[in-house]
Image (cartoon, rainbow, N blue to C red):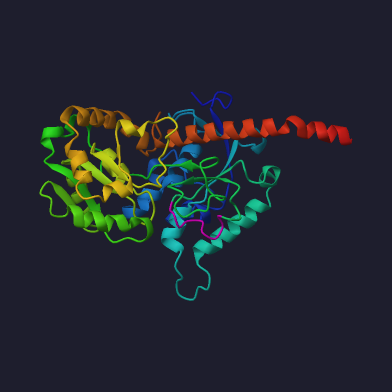
Amino acid sequence: MACDPLQAHLRVYMYDLPPEFHFGLLDWKGRGNQTWPNIQNPSQIPAYPGGLNLQHSIEYWLTLDLLLSNVPTMFRPCTAIRVKNSSQADVIFVPFFSSLSYNRHSKLHRKEKVSVNKQLQEKLVQFLMSRDEWKRWGGKNHLIVAHHPNSMLDARRKLGSAMFVLADFGRYPVEIANLEKDIIAPYRHLVATVPSNESASFSERPTLAYFRGAIYRKDGGVIRQELFYLLKDEKDVQFSFGTIKGSGINQASQGMASSKFCLHIAGDTPSSNRLFDAIASHCVPVIISDEIELPFEDVLDYSQFCIFVSAPDAIKKGYLLNLLRGIDQEKWTKMWERLKEIIHFFEYQYPSQSGDAVDMIWEAVSRKISSMRFNRHKNNRYNRQVIRTKL
């Protein structure tokens, strides 16, 4: 059955932006004036590039989901549905693959004086500012995905009234991005999800704590270096430098799947895909990132499956190891079981499924829109009365 717009939690109007803003960035070329690929045929859907690009692919999955919402023969949740008339919409979606634009086109090539990424942002600002949909509410009902922390650098201030879908607020001033109006979305994890029936138990995980990644970082990430010198010689701890190059993802997958705890330590930004790799590996995350914001925290209690340690405590000699070694098998197993229950909330897939990451993001947007609508209606209590009095 087709989704009924009246029953959907969220009615979404999506601009038909030219392909240069979305699937054209994946080297897709439609026929004639074709704007979107044939999403009913999976073989015709351009694949998103792998590696680190994939972790910020959120706009790709949301766009595909909206396109699919108008195909009655394909099954997906009816949480969000695309409507063709903007006046019927709760939110206006901007299908700009901003993270991919940054990753692929932020550097100058050949005789370019302005990068393609910057050109696209300038075109997007001009387009949005000219639209009646933007002018009506000053952009407050627009949804823009800027998951890579460096995406939308040139346009974010001009478009700051819109609702952003972000990884964290690490590189945003509070007047541009904040929890009152914006959504925190999970990274797409890079390691494969461990099947629940193959997940190693407490006694089957010989490593106490695991971290693999860049060690020398700037700003809030300097804590990684301090923890490296504190933990590197511990026999039951794996703390090493690593990247995704070569067999890096496979090594991380094996390391996390055989460890009781996986360290998520602030780097150049408060968040990283490492947290979601740990969740996919059923390795209890230890979050050492005081400024982190977590996806869907208004409906998920992370304390049920994560350990939180403040940065000042973490670098006290012996504190972190004593804390982790003091967590017995029973407590760890409860957190491990909870990880297996909530992993689907962080899975991106096509078609989307009920309760997966795409569905959860739409639900989060719906809650945010509801709150914004409440505040707008409340502010109108006396505004209209003043207008009538003046008339």
Q: Is residue 29 visible?
A: no
56 vs 107: above or below: above
Secondary structure mostly seen in the magenta stretch: loop
Query: Which residue is at the far right?
Result: 391
| Residue in front for this viewpoint, 363 or 168 | 168
Q: Quadrant of the C terminus?
A: top right
Where does residue 53 sit, x and y in percent of width and height?
Answer: 37, 54
Q: Is residue 387 left or right of residue 55?
A: right
The residue located at (48%, 54%) in the rendering is 98
The residue located at (39%, 38%) in the rendering is 350
Tell me if residue 150 is in the magenta stretch: yes
| Residue in front for this viewpoint, 78 or 1 | 78
Where does residue 149 sit, x and y in percent of width and height?
Answer: 44, 54
The residue located at (20%, 29%) in the rendering is 333
Q: Is residue 333 left or right of residue 346?
A: left
| Residue in front for this viewpoint, 8 or 365 | 365
The residue located at (42%, 47%) in the rendering is 167
Tell me if residue 68 is in the magenta stretch: no
| Residue in front for this viewpoint, 57 or 33 | 57
Query: What segment carries the magenta color?
Result: 148-156
Where does residue 326 sit, x and y in percent of width and height?
Answer: 18, 35
The image quadrant that residue 307 belongs to is: top left
Q: Is residue 183 left or right of residue 54?
A: right
Count of picture labels? 0
Q: Is residue 231 visible?
A: yes
The image quadrant that residue 374 belongs to is: top right
Where does residue 228 sit, x and y in percent of width and height?
Answer: 22, 56
